[in-house]
Image: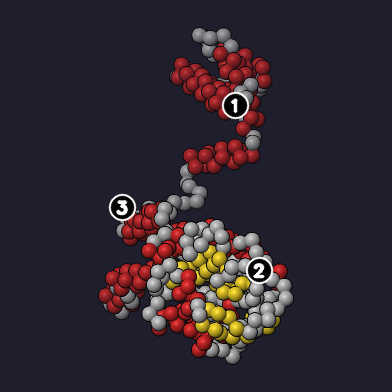
Amino acid sequence: MSAPAAETAQEPFSRRTLFWGIFASLFAAAGFFLLSTYAPDFRQPGGGATPLSKGGSGYAGLVEWLKLTGTPSPMAQSEEDLSTGLMSGFLLIVTISPDSDPAALDRIVKLREDKATLFVLPKWQTMPLEQHEGWDIKIERLPATAVNQWLGRIGKAKLGEGKSTVEQLDINGHLVAAPEDMQWVADDHPLISAGNGKGVLTELDDKPFYILTDPDLINNAALKDPDRARAALDLIAMLEPGKGAVMFDLTLHGAGRKYDLAKLLVEPPFLALTLSILAAAALAFLHGLGRFGPPRAEGRAIAFGKQALVDTTAMLLKRAGRLDELGDRYGALMRQRAAALLGAPHGLQGEALDRWLDSRDKGEAQGFTTRLKAADNASSLADMHEAAEKLHDWTARRLGERR
């Protein structure tokens, strides 16, 4: 096989193809991360007593009904929509579900203190209908205590006890059949009356808040009756501050409140940090594409030569913690070496040999013995090194004088 053929076999893809493949993978990963992060925001809450639910207890029919009659109804998906902007002056319709967040309702009440708001209380306990997605089935009426918990967060009122005997309700001059097992509150001057001292639609004295105690007047189940469908429009017309100024709330049902770590990474003020990290990673990647200088050859694990042997031995002694015991041994070794180099008489040992070596030094009394004791008494690596140098210098000087 020729050399060009071998190179082609080793590189089936060109560098340009690899580069674009890596770029496409990174781009797809970034897109997947962003879509996964914001996917919950695109999934509008549905089911139950929400403005998007098509079940009997939902209000999607009212939204569509208002749109068909020339009153488009935007959805408030964040707390900013409730308190600021053009939509803040709309009549806000807050549909309460049994599984809504009480803290979210408290925030709505606080944000809308001086703005027209219609609160629709829950009435029925429902469950999803498996045969039809988005539909629900009515199980039973909610206990009065459960409804009063929501009612108490809006104003100082409780559901009235007992059933209303009124069979029809007067809504802006139109009579409609009263809902089944109607909910009501005590009110001497209600906007919609269910009898003496009983109100279905009531207004708070200190705030522009309206409370519809029975949702069966405007929910999907009610709109199947033409009279109630017309009455639902009349009811809203009584309350809206301006023609066509109606807005439905979704924040109570979970919209606009999903925060997580991934969003912090891609939204200010931490977006700048994320971009800086990505830029640094890109620069490091570009830096790694090319080599600066020849590749460094890998060295041997154990080097050759006497120096490597000495260094390895010293390292082992240091790790074993035996350096403090080497002073006297090194002194004994240097005594034997000096005796051999200077020609000491055979058989001399110990102090006799030290005295003979001292006699070789005419310029200093006990020159060798003093240096030998310094090596024996060395307690640190620096002291031992200094004593060893002095012993070596003394022996080298005496050997030079002899020659």
10 Å neighbourhood of mark 3: few (<14), some, or many (≥20)? Answer: few
SS for callout 3: loop
In which quarter of the view is residue 220 placed? Answer: bottom right
Q: Is residue 126 left or right of residue 61?
A: right
**Residue in view at x 48 percent, y 64 percent:** 116
Tell me the residue that label 2 is attached to: 186
Front label number (3 vs 1):
3
Going from N to C along the chain, the mark reached first, 2 or 1, is 2
Pick whichever, 192 or 360, lies toward us.
192
Residue 28 lies, with reference to residue 288, above or below; the image says below
| Image location of residue 113, percent across then percent down | 51, 58
| Image location of residue 32, percent across then percent down | 43, 71
10 Å neighbourhood of mark 1: few (<14), some, or many (≥20)? Answer: few
In which quarter of the view is residue 42 placed? Answer: bottom left
| Image location of residue 359, percent across then percent down | 57, 12
Pick whichever, 17 or 332, lies toward us.
17
Tell me the residue that label 1 is attached to: 380
Tell me the residue that label 3 is attached to: 293
| Image location of residue 89, percent across then percent down | 42, 64
Residue 233 shows in this picture = yes
